[in-house]
Amino acid sequence: MEQKRVLITKDKTFYRSLFALAAPIALQNLITFAVTFADSLMVGTLGDAAISGVYMGGQIQTLLQLLSGGVEGAILILAAQYWGKKDTASMKKIIAVGTHFSLAVGCFLTAACALFPSLILSVFTREEAVIREGSGYLSIVCFSYVFFTVTQALIAAARSVESARIGMAVSAVSLAVNILLNYALIFGRLGLPAMGVRGAAVATLASRITETLVIAGYTFKTDQKLKLRPADFMKSDALLRRDFIRCGLPIIGGQLIWGVNMMGNSMILGRFDQYVIAGASVANSLNTLAYVAMNGMSAAVGIITGKTVGAWKTELMKEYARTTQILFLGLGLLTGGMIFLLKGTFIGLYAGLAAETAAYADQFCRVLSVTFIGTCYQAACLFGLVKSGGDVAFVFKNDAVFVLLVVLPSAILASRLGAPAWVVFACLKCDQILKCAVAYVKINSFNWIKDLTRDRPG
């Protein structure tokens, strides 16, 4: 007899795990956002050229997060499935392989930005003042990239065994260091020189070094689940390395597509004047802030999904998937409404904004209040369920089609036709709504539930 279709699971373990994991991850994301936001607010007092320069310089950090996130995603997906089987020996090897790849990404981008900061920024904008300010920022902050990649790989390892609080603690320490040094080095307080945007870069570098020291101390001295040691990172396994590459390549490919999307966003908006660039910076900060809670819950869904699929509880996974769709659609409607209602208050936090910048920011936030509804639903479905459930290639292909054939072409066409900046911005965000239809069909087919481990049942 066919099993009764459950729309909302009654399994209390799901809700306990979801909120126990989501809260610290969301708080970690909020604190991480606050580090960047503190830079933006303090630098914002130096004028539109400074805030635009830091925004453009920060695009490389965004690219780093995307590339590093691909590696970390592979760590989390594979390690979480092995955690479902309590196979910590295989997990250690997966984490070592992932850390090596992540470190390589950080070293490459550090070298490129240290040697060619102005050249890299000239790809995004022709505004000389923005390039000058951004180069000063980028030439220093790039040395934080290596520390960032190591930290994120170790946090992903901790999350895979459901230890999410350490990420929050690491980010809290980083925030404290960053805000203190921002205050001292941007404005010349506490007996230190006033360095402007360069001071913000030095503060970020110091906070990233602190993060790495804290997570390394936890990983090697405190953690009792994995019990990783430095020697574990010297070991490898040919079979698991191949598994990691097979799983990781589509994830990294998807992240690269998003990197292309982000770079395309910057290049398209960078052809407008500095008021549009600064307005987009403000609006995207609000978008990132709104994304915090959703991303924390989506990441929690991913951990639960990996563990459930690894334990081969297929019917239970279907229940969780239906519940996830309803929860995140509701979250999207709630968050979209809050963006619309609070946009004026948020924009007002930026002291010294030109009236033109504030007007553009308001228009862009109106667009986000609509597109974010789709962001919540499709991101949780495609990343929290499909990707973590084992069908990593589908998410890569889907993103590639939308970014390369819909988002960027439509935005380029709109800008060439002289459309208002908010229309171009809407084109850059249109996939967030369009992908919902794809996500709905894919999730409810349940063909994405795939065990990626090497000790499958039967």
Image (cartoon, rainbow, N blue to C red):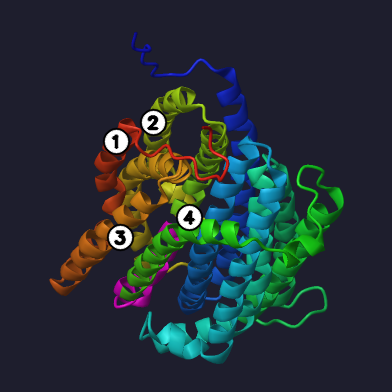
Distance of mark 1 from mark 2, alpha carbons? 8 Å
Which of pointers 4 and 3 lies earlier in the amino acid sequence? 4
Q: Is residue 9 left or right of residue 92?
A: left
Would you place residue 325 above or below residue 185 in this image?
Answer: above
In the rendered structure, find residue 440 and report the number of the disc placed on it: 1
Q: Is residue 405 above or below residue 218?
A: below
Cα separation, mark 1 vs mark 3, equals 18 Å
Q: Earlier in the sequence, mark 2 or mark 3?
A: 2
Q: Nearer the viewer, residue 447 or 241?
A: 241
User: How many C-alpha atoms fall within 10 Å of the one at disc 3: few (<14), some, or many (≥20)?
Assistant: many
**Label 4 crowd bin: few (<14), some (14–19), many (20+), radius 10 Å:** many
| Location of residue 263 in the rendering, given as x and y in whole percent from the top left corner | 38, 72
Disc 2 residue type (three-letter): Gln
- Determine which of the numbered discs, if any, sits on residue 325 in the image: 2
- Location of residue 215 with respect to 49 vertically, above or below: above
Q: Which residue is mark 4?
A: 247
| Crowd tier of the residue under label 1, counting other residues whose Cα lies within 10 Å: few below 14, some 14–19, many 20 or above | some
Secondary-structure class at tag 3 = helix
Residue tagged by mark 3? Answer: 400
